[in-house]
Amino acid sequence: MKFAVLVFPGSNCDIDCYKAVEAIGEQVDYVWHTTTDLSAYDAIIVPGGFSYGDYLRCGAIARFAGVMNEVKKAAEQGKYILGICNGFQILTEAGLLPGALIRNTGLKFRCHQTPLVVANSNTAFTSEYAEGEQLMIPIAHGEGNYYCDDATLAELQTNNQIVFRYANGTNPNGSVDDIAGIMNKAGNVVGMMPHPERAMDALLGSADGKRMFTSILKAWREQHGTAING
């Protein structure tokens, strides 16, 4: 399996994402924001950071980068797309996921370990987790407050598109329905504010993020009839 990690001016979590893919033994490339061909890749990671300095608002400029046209094509082809933090913001700005990320309640940047609950384990991104399992995944954001209107929220709930929620009343940013991560209707595009790539080893405080990457690998291998140990 081959992963692309997108790099925008201002990305700062691209190296972490690259190392996370290396940790599960798969191929990975950094892909610059001007790239116009992603056909060689099976999965695309849109990392965190401050793309284009987050001028205007988070992700608002990155959505117009040349590579985003290719990300949209990849999503339509059913390839796996994972947007983390600023990547989640970019995916909402690009219309690949519904809703928007706005300023945290309290208007403060939050950076700490955060307990999450797996709201849907029946996805290509979460099959290695148990439904309702609690994870420890760090956050680092000032604009992670997920917002959508009532109709969109009802649709997300009805279609089981909410993938992660903040656990035990710990919602750090005011997100509606405690949402920490969602997916598109097709189930191949996920956006989340917490950073699974920063939770790949217990030495870092948690290894709970690793199974997100192995879940993607498992789904791809099942789709392509490749043995897990092959």
Image (tube, rainbow, N blue to C red):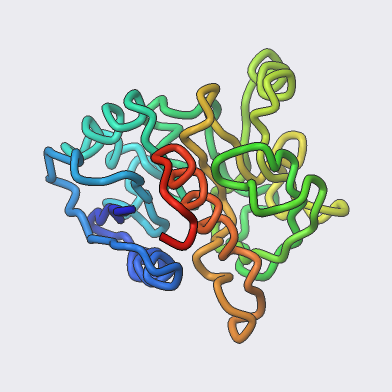
Q: Is residue 78 left or right of residue 194?
A: left
Position of residue 148 relative to residue 138, above or below, is: above
Position of residue 203 relative to residue 152, above or below, is: below
Of residues 48 and 79, the one nearer the viewer is 79
Of residues 215 and 203, the one nearer the viewer is 215
Position of residue 97 relative to residue 154, above or below, is: below
Total marks in image: 0
Estimate the x, y position of residue 68 in percent, counting from the top left. 25, 36
Position of residue 151 relative to residue 118, above or below, is: above
- Residue at the (73%, 48%) spot, across then down: 118
Of residues 66 and 201, the one nearer the viewer is 201
Q: Is residue 215 left or right of residue 76?
A: right
Of residues 218 and 191, the one nearer the viewer is 218
Estimate the x, y position of residue 56 in percent, counting from the top left. 34, 40
> Image quadrant of residue 36?
top left
Q: The C terminus lies in which quarter of the figure?
A: bottom left
> Image quadrant of residue 9?
bottom left
- Residue at the (61%, 38%) spot, across then down: 123
> Image quadrant of residue 5?
bottom left
Estimate the x, y position of residue 52 in percent, counting from the top left. 27, 51
Estimate the x, y position of residue 226 in percent, counting from the top left. 41, 48
- Residue at the (50%, 65%) spot, across then down: 197
- Residue at the (52%, 58%) spot, across then down: 214
Residue sitting at the far bottom = 203
Residue sitting at the far top = 151
Q: Is residue 70 left or right of residue 23?
A: left
